């Protein structure tokens, strides 16, 4: 299993690969790193792939994923979001909420991290294009996760002994992570 993170979604997109050890399983607490000063959480959309594929055409990419979730990636505040390096392999730096069927999550519109609003995609076209583009660089396999930045999302400050909670407009929890 690998994690494919899009740093940008522009036509000249940047992709960063993370090892499976970077994923913190849902329900487990996230440990606030004791190095690097202040830390933030970047909200992202997680896409769970469910088939093996290489060079997938965009019109068929919807067949290669079965679930979406809201996710966060932590990084030091002073680090440029585009830089990868050693933090791409940092253990337990990425976590996600409960997996939902694509049509369920795409219909939500926005999610709230306390006072911070993040806009979720409203249609699968962006996701299909990202899965297709990732499959040009690497063979995608069942269980791989593609992380996409969310439009208009701002970084969320992290503090020890806090909780990251994201909710849908109807107060349905999308992500709930304890930071210790």
Image: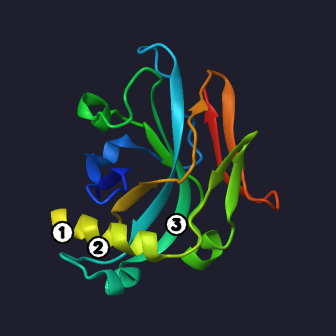
Q: Are marks 1 and 2 in contact (CB under 8 Å)?
A: yes
Up the image or down, 170 lies above or below 154; here it is below
Residue receiving disc 2:
132
Labels 2, 3: front one: 2
Neighbor class of circle 1 (other Cα within 10 Å; few <14, some 14-19, many 20+) is some
- Is residue 164 rendered to the left or right of residue 70? right
Residue at (31, 55) in percent of width and height: 4
Q: Secondary structure at mark 3?
A: strand
Instruction: Please tell me which residue lies in front, 51 or 129.
Output: 129
Residue 73 percent coordinates (x, y): 46, 40
Task: Determine the CA span between mark 1 and mark 3.
Answer: 21 Å
Neighbor class of circle 3 (other Cα within 10 Å; few <14, some 14-19, many 20+) is many
Which label sits on residue 64? none
Up the image or down, 112 lies above or below 45; here it is above
Instruction: Please tell me which residue lies in front, 32 or 79.
Output: 79
Q: Quadrant of the N terminus?
A: bottom left
Task: Determine the CA span between mark 2 and mark 3.
Answer: 16 Å
Residue 118 percent coordinates (x, y): 63, 50
Residue receiving disc 1:
136
Q: Between disc 1 and disc 3, whose residue precedes?
A: 3
Residue 131 percent coordinates (x, y): 33, 70
Q: Secondary structure at mark 1?
A: helix
Q: Secondary structure at mark 2?
A: helix
Residue 22 percent coordinates (x, y): 36, 41
Residue receiving disc 3:
68
Residue at (27, 50) in percent of width and height: 14
Is any atom of residue 158 visible in this view?
Answer: yes
């Amino acid at each position: 299993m690998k994690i494919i993170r899009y740093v940008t979604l522009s036509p000249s997109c940047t992709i960063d690969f993370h090892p499976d050890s970077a994923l913190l399983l849902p329900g487990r607490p996230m440990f606030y790193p004791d190095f690097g000063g202040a830390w933030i959480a970047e909200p992202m959309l997680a896409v769970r792939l469910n088939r093996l594929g290489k060079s997938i055409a965009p019109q068929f990419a919807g067949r290669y994923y079965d679930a979406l979730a809201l996710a966060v990636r932590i990084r030091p505040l002073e680090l440029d979001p585009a830089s990868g390096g050693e933090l791409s392999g940092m253990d337990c730096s990425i976590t996600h909420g409960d997996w939902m069927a694509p049509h369920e999550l795409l219909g939500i519109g926005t999610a709230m991290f306390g006072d911070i609003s993040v806009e979720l995609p409203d249609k699968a076209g962006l996701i299909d294009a990202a899965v297709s583009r990732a499959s040009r660089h690497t063979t995608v396999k069942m269980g791989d996760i593609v992380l996409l930045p969310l439009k208009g999302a701002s970084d969320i400050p992290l503090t020890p002994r806090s909780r990251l909670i994201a909710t849908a407009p109807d107060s349905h929890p999308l992500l709930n992570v304890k930071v210790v």
